[in-house]
């Protein structure tokens, strides 16, 4: 009898995700094995992990997905799709793996299938909703003290609903590889320091903004945002075409930012909508829900209903911003109609500013396919013996090292950044105080320090080592000129602020190109860090005199592919307390 023809190997698509509400914090993973032709979910897996980091949860999700595929067919070929640039790049061999928590998980994942039978692809977060929802279901179950159960899961139904709402042209089989319809708030993928391997292959543009922990927005997470999820505090940013709604997440305090075309409502639980003429930005109902709507002529921005609901609307001619009825409802708008009910109050300018700051943490009004920004976490070096004396200490002076206080500050920064787990590379000014600070932090993160000449401090010429009062006494005319013009140089041929600005702008462009899509710690000095912030804000040179920057403080700026910049943090010192 003739031998039977060998059975052709099956092909699977594995989508996996993981998240941590706190990073580290209560965490879980989700994974689904899909038929690549029909998009049918063949196996789902999810698990609550206890308190771990985002990256550990993501790797655990990958491992679960690969094992589920191997159980279906150990001879299969697998295409893994994840929205974690870190995991995709490390498992593809383009980034090194240094973090001790990541190495064993990556090695275990590589052993599930023989080499060459697994390929990896990064996808936008909005295209990974099925696995994302599974991970959140696992975390929600863990919070209740229960184990995740496949019978209780609605992740596949939610993914199918998302497909039905997707723009035309996206089929079930390709539903998670289409254009992104949502990007997360503020941040880049949390990393463990996975820099490119020696043979090259750094981070490519396209990584979505990552999270400091699903279900919360951590203002001190250096640009790490949140994902859309059915959980307390979840958020999502959606951009959709004409007729395609951007739908947010459900749950208490959930929020969604939607940008929609004409006639396409941006709907969410607490929604921020930008809509064309006649296209309302509609909020959601529920306790604590809020909506911020910007609408064209004749397009009302409608608030939300429920206890404590609020709506902020900016409307064109004839387009009222309507408040939300209910106890404690408030509305801010031009023109604005108050909300009937008990305890109606107008939103204060301070409250509006806080809420607006959260909104603009998204990548602006540009398209969603710009990819992840290059995020620069700007660390001023720790104290030197000259710092408490407030003496000019630039690049032309004695080049002091850190004092004992400065070294302790650097250790505290290192511990804080290690907990956050977002830094992927460390770059420092060539001066002794910055190299020492960077070395302490990099050692804690398992990274190496690259030196960038452009990050050095301004040269203060003959003023080096003097206090402001001493300069005023010895060189009054030169000091007055320096305070009056960015083109003026310190006495003795130092560097003007204009020259510093030109140098920092060139350094910024060089580093943005080198670290596209990654989160990088830049260890520098007062004037360069203030200049990064000034340039990002488009502020005038005199703004340098209106910023206070403490030793060992953290600031952050994100740079997008369209040339836009977003200041995420300034002079943050909570880690020193």
Image (cartoon, rainbow, N blue to C red):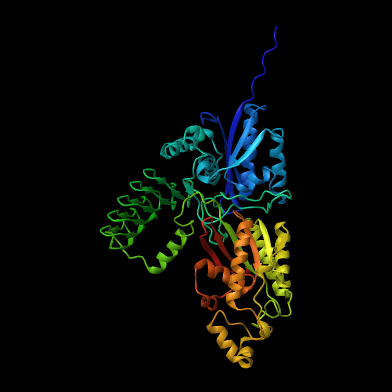
Q: Say above or below: 469 vs 39.
A: below
Q: Say above or below: 535 vs 240.
A: below
Quarter that holds the C terminus: bottom right
Q: Residue at x 58, y 72 (%)?
A: 501
- For the residue pair 132 and 137, the one nearer the viewer reads as 132
User: Is residue 408 found left or right of 31 in the rendered image?
Assistant: right
Percent across and percent down for residue 133 are 51, 42
Q: Is residue 51 visible?
A: no
Percent across and percent down for residue 136 are 53, 44
Residue 381: name its quadrant.
bottom right
Q: Residue at x 51, y 76 (%)?
A: 543
User: Is residue 82 found left or right of 168 in the rendered image?
Assistant: right
Residue found at the far top of this picture = 1
- For the residue pair 330 and 477, the one nearer the viewer reads as 477
Residue 161: name its quadrant.
top left
Percent across and percent down for residue 62 are 63, 40
- For the residue pair 338 and 1, the one nearer the viewer reads as 1
Q: Residue at x 53, y 45 (%)?
A: 124
Q: Residue at x 37, y 68 (%)?
A: 348
- For the residue pair 360 and 156, the one nearer the viewer reads as 360
Q: Is residue 451 visible?
A: yes
Residue found at the far left of this picture = 318
Residue 300: name its quadrant.
bottom left
Count of numbered circles on the image: 0
Residue found at the far bottom of this picture = 473
Q: Say above or below: 406 vs 128.
A: below
Q: Say above or below: 442 vs 169.
A: below
């Amino acid at each position: 009898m003739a031998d039977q023809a060998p059975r052709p190997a099956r092909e699977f698509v594995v989508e996996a995700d993981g998240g941590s509400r706190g990073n580290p914090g209560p965490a879980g993973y989700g994974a689904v094995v899909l038929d690549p032709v029909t998009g049918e979910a063949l196996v789902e897996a999810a698990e609550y992990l206890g308190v771990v980091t985002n990256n550990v949860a993501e790797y655990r999700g990958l491992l679960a997905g690969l094992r589920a595929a191997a159980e279906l067919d150990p001879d299969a070929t697998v295409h893994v799709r994840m929205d974690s640039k870190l995991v995709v790049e490390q498992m593809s061999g383009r980034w090194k793996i240094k973090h001790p928590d990541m190495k064993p998980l990556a090695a275990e994942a590589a052993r599930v299938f023989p080499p060459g039978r697994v390929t990896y692809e990064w996808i936008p977060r909005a295209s990974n909703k099925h696995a994302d929802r599974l991970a959140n279901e696992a975390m929600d179950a863990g919070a209740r003290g229960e184990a995740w159960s496949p019978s209780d899961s609605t992740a596949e139904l939610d993914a199918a609903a998302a497909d039905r709402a997707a723009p035309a042209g996206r089929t079930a089989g390709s539903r998670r590889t289409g254009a992104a319809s949502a990007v997360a708030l503020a941040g880049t993928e949390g990393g463990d320091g996975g820099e490119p391997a020696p043979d090259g292959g750094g981070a490519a543009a396209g990584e979505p903004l990552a999270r400091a922990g699903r279900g919360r927005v951590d203002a001190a997470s250096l640009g790490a945002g949140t994902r859309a999820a059915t959980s307390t505090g979840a958020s999502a940013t959606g951009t959709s075409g004409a007729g395609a709604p951007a739908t947010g997440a459900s749950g208490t305090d959930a929020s969604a930012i939607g940008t929609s075309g004409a006639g396409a409502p941006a709907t969410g639980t607490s929604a921020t909508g930008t809509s064309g003429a006649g296209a309302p930005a509609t909020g959601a109902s529920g306790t604590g829900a809020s909506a911020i709507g910007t609408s064209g002529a004749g397009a009302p921005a409608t608030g939300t209903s429920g206890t404590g609901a609020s709506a902020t609307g900016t409307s064109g001619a004839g387009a009222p911003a309507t408040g939300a009825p209910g106890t404690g409802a408030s509305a801010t708008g031009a023109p604005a109609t108050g909300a009937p009910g008990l305890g109606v109050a107008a939103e204060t300018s301070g409250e509006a500013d806080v809420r607006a700051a959260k909104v603009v943490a998204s990548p602006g009004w540009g398209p969603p396919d710009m990819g992840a920004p290059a995020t620069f976490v700007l660390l001023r070096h720790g104290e030197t013996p000259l710092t408490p004396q407030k003496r000019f200490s630039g690049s032309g002076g004695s080049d002091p090292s850190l004092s004992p206080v400065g070294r302790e500050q650097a250790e505290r920064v290192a511990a804080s950044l290690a907990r956050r787990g977002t830094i992927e590379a460390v770059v420092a000014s060539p001066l002794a105080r910055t190299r020492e600070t960077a070395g302490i932090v990099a050692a804690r993160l398992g990274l190496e320090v690259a030196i960038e000449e452009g990050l050095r401090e301004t040269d203060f010429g003959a003023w080096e080592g003097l206090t402001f009062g001493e300069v005023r006494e010895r060189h009054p005319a030169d000091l007055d000129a320096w305070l009056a013009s960015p083109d003026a140089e310190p006495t003795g041929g130092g560097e003007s602020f204009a020259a510093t600005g030109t140098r920092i702008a060139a350094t910024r462009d060089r580093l943005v190109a080198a670290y596209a899509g990654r989160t990088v710690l830049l260890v520098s000095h007062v004037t360069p860090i203030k200049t990064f912030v000034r340039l990002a804000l488009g502020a005038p040179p005199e703004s340098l005199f209106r910023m206070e920057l403490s030793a060992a403080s953290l600031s952050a700026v994100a740079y997008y592919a369209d040339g836009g910049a977003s200041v995420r943090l300034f002079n943050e010192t909570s880690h020193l307390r």
